[in-house]
Amino acid sequence: MDFKELQNFIKFVTKSGASEVSLETDNFKVTVKTSGAEGVSYVTAAPAVMAASTPAAPAASAPAAAAAAPVIEDEFADCVAIKSPMIGTFYLKPSPDKPAFKSVGDTVKAGETVCIIEAMKLFNEIESEVTGKIVKIVANDMTPVEYGQTLFLVEPA
């Protein structure tokens, strides 16, 4: 089950009026609990899912990605964007008392973790798909981000 399917499952459970639904596969277990009219959902997962990292996903379609992408100034025209593969809360640090994964001016290698996005109490490590130098951090730390939103701009090496 990918992230989009998980989102659809939660929406379905919330709209169905059920108070609790569990789904279990070989790889994970998800329990969605709703609290009446509030419609608040809680999700728990097996530890293997919580520790798994999520590589950045390609954009779903060019028109949708173009509509969601912010306008990039000319000075960043040659840069590659690291985009959010999901909706969630963006974190630059693995925990409040640790240093940021990456800062402006740092070099990054493809496959290296650059941030975390928390989605439904799951912390997903976001990896760079490009090797180069981080020239801009577009998203603000500890703020919500959307699917396809630019998080970092990287000058390819």
Image: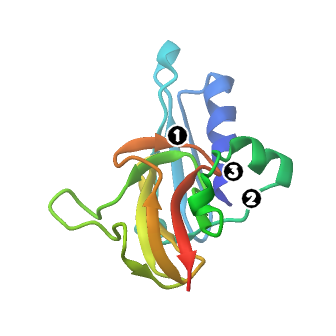
Look at label 1 and name its amino acid. Answer: Val
Considering depth in this image, is 5 or 56 the residue closer to the camera?
A: 56
**Of label 3 and label 2, which has the lower sequence position?**
3
Place residue 100 in its image quadrant.
bottom left
Tags 3 and 2 in contact by the CB under 8 Å rule? Answer: no
Look at label 2 and name its amino acid. Answer: Ala
Tags 1 and 2 in contact by the CB under 8 Å rule? Answer: no
- Visible residue check, residue 152: yes
**x 41%, y 64%: residue:** 115
Residue 132 position in % (x across, y down):
51, 81
- Does 118 sit above or below residue 104? above
* Residue at image mark 3: 4
How far apart in space, not on screen, are marks 3 and 2 (Cα)? 13 Å
* Residue at image mark 1: 32
How far apart in space, not on screen, are marks 3 and 1 (Cα)? 15 Å
Q: From the viewer's perspective, tell me whether residue 67 is left or right of residue 24.
A: right
The residue mark sitting in front, 3 or 2, is: 2
* Residue at image mark 2: 59
How far apart in space, not on screen, are marks 1 and 2 (Cα)? 28 Å
Residue 36 position in % (x across, y down):
50, 17
Neighbour tally class for label 1: few under 14, some 14-19, many 20 plus, Cα within 10 Å: many
Residue 69 position in % (x across, y down):
67, 47
User: Which quarter shows the N terminus?
Assistant: bottom right
Mark 2 lies on a secondary structure that is loop
